[in-house]
Image: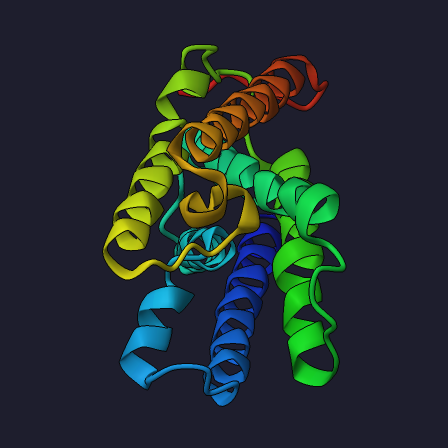
Amino acid sequence: MDSIRRSNALVAGVIGLVMVVLQLVVYLRSGVAPVGVMLLRFFCYFTILTNLLAAVVFVRIGLGRLGSASLVTAVTGYMLVVGIIHYFFLRGLRELNGAGLVADMFLHVVLPFSCLVYWVMWVEKGGLKWRSAFVWLGYPLGYILWIMVVGAVTGFYPYPFANVGNLGYPRALANGGMILAGSWVVFAVLIGMGRKLPLSRKLP
């Protein structure tokens, strides 16, 4: 069973890395700005950073470096936030086709769902702590600060709900606060599920 678990994690991690690279190729081919500028913008997307994080964690798990239940649950939560934001706020804003459509589907739908399936099936969740939901907010909070700094310097904001130029700081920061609150709800739901699922076991 352990070999199956590790194989599933490795496959998910490798697919994640491949899809991020594919999305990078598609993005660079658009040629809307110099390569250096486009690389900076590419790594301003929460989708890209989060999928990279998840891919690295799952590749490490696949190679036998076990991730703690807390880490995997946090990453699963981040990936679910990616999928939720995309579904409710970003879906349909751009017309996609070909490789771009494939990468978009994997990064926003397939891989978040895969993380959730892995979490349900393989993670020992019984020892998750409620306070972790607040600790895990550090990553999305750091991301919000990152895009605010990049936006202030370059004028580029990766998402319309974060665009200070159009919305102003009060509205953009309020949107960020709503995303943090929504993320906390996702984390809390995962912790609650983890503590009640029949297969959950306490961490050693």
Instruction: Please indicate, yes or no, whether residue 82 appears anywhere in the rendered image.
Output: yes
Rendered view: 135 above or below 115: above
Res 71 → quadrant = top left
* Count of numbered labels shown in the rendering: 0
State the colouring used for the structure image.
rainbow
Side (left or right) of 181 relative to 105: left
Q: Position of residue 183 (x, y in %)?
A: 54, 28
Q: Nearer the viewer, residue 74 or 201?
A: 74
Asked whether residue 68 is in view, the answer is no
Give the percent coordinates (x, y) of residue 148. 32, 44
161 relative position to 87: left or right: left
Judging depth in this view, the residue of 171 and 82 nearest the camera is: 171
Q: Is residue 180 left or right of residue 34?
A: right
State which quarter of the image contains the C terminus: top left
* Residue 113 x %, y %: 70, 48
Residue at x-position 70% and y-position 19% = 197
In the picture shown, does residue 176 fall above or below 51? above
Instruction: Reply above or below: 89 against 25.
Output: above
- Residue 140 is situated, as x and y percent measured from the top left of the image, at 41, 36
| Nearer the observer, 99 or 5 | 99
Q: Residue at coordinates 46% horizontally, 82% vertically from top-left?
A: 32
Residue at image location 48% in from the left, 17% down from the top: 128
Residue, x 52% and y 31% (percent of image)? 175
